[in-house]
Image (cartoon, rainbow, N blue to C red):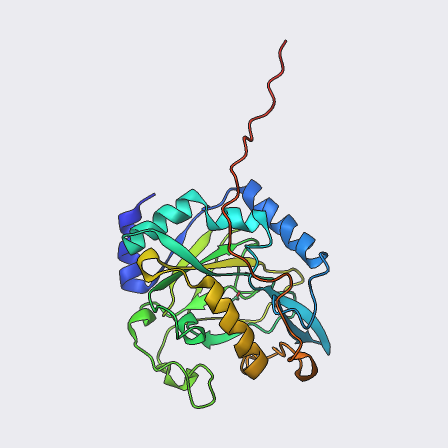
Amino acid sequence: MNIDAYKQAYERDGCFVVKSLFLPTEIQSMTEESMALVQSGLVARDNLRTEMWERDGQAVLSKFDPVADISETYAKAVYQDDTSSILSALFDEPAILFKDKLVYKIPGHKGFGPHHDHAYHMDYPEDMVAVAIALDPMRKENGCIEVVLGSHKFNLPVVNENGDFATEEIPEDAIWTPIELEAGDALFFSNLMLHRSAPNQTEDMRRALFLTYNRSSDGEHRMSYYNDHKNNVARNGYGESEGNFAVPEDLKNSAKFFPPVTRVVKPESKNELSPVISL
Ligand SMILES: O=C(O)CCC(=O)C(=O)O
């Protein structure tokens, strides 16, 4: 792993790709877990963990957000060794988890408009790194992430008077680069990096796990962020992203995270050696 090359790319472009960061067996566990979560009974329009989108007049699951505190499989991904080493090198100190979400991007999902993530948590440290881990191949046809290389240095005013991302401030000549990934690859990108994604025009889901970290010297903010998130959603919804109707008006007062958000605990490492058979 050439950590210096990653650091240089991060400084210059605001992002870089790490191929095969996760093993096929790890990806398989995560995709199986994503389906177990769908069937867990947690997907509901008043559950703030499960962001819903509209498709053909029906509410469908868009994201589990957060997810790592209810799933040992995803908690393991948070603490994966190579990810931690790369993040420590970028920050020059250990990283702390800020946010974790599992995006399902089902067929027909309309995609995500241009934004950077800091706009959605401006009260928290600016210096964060997101890691988008592909659980399925991410291609142009199923709405891979597209980025504007170098845009972490644009210093954009992020929010307009409606409280939405100020897309009108994005330079007209900005070049959007699609980042195609294989399952197991990961895109590391700055919290200030402009990104978006197109609709999923295929017949299959395009799942990705997004883990966002801040530097340890900036402190731990995850619990406080999700507490604020609850109030923001109840007050405003999620803005005007196309297709996103989040928590409906009549459920806003009762909407809550279930189960309640807890800290992400590092799973005990288990001895995974095969049993030895004496002959
Ligand atoms: O999953 C995607 O296509 C992009 C998601 C994204 O940009 C976000 O959730 O902020």
Query: Whole-percent x and y of residue 223?
Result: 48, 63
Examine the rendered structure and indicate whether residue 258 appears above or below residue 45. above
Q: Quick check: 174 above or below 276?
A: below
Label count reads 0
Left or right of 69: which side holds 46? right
Q: Residue at x 59, y 60 (%)?
A: 206
Give the quadrant of residue 148: bottom left
Percent x, y of residue 7: 28, 54
- Quarter of the image for residue 257 reads bottom right
**Among all residues in the image, which is located at the extreme bottom?**
161
Residue nearer the viewer, 165 or 40:
40
Q: Residue at x 30, y 47 (%)?
A: 3
User: Outermost residue, top direction?
Assistant: 279
Looking at the picture, does residue 148 appear above or below residue 218? below
Q: Residue at x 67, y 76 (%)?
A: 254
Quadrant of the drawing holding the N terminus? top left
Q: Does residue 5 show up? A: yes
Image quarter hosting the C terminus: top right
Q: Position of residue 56 (x, y in %)?
A: 72, 77
From the viewer's perspective, tell me whether residue 277 is left or right of residue 228: right
Residue 197 seen in render: no
In the image, residue 108 lies at what x, y percent?
A: 65, 70
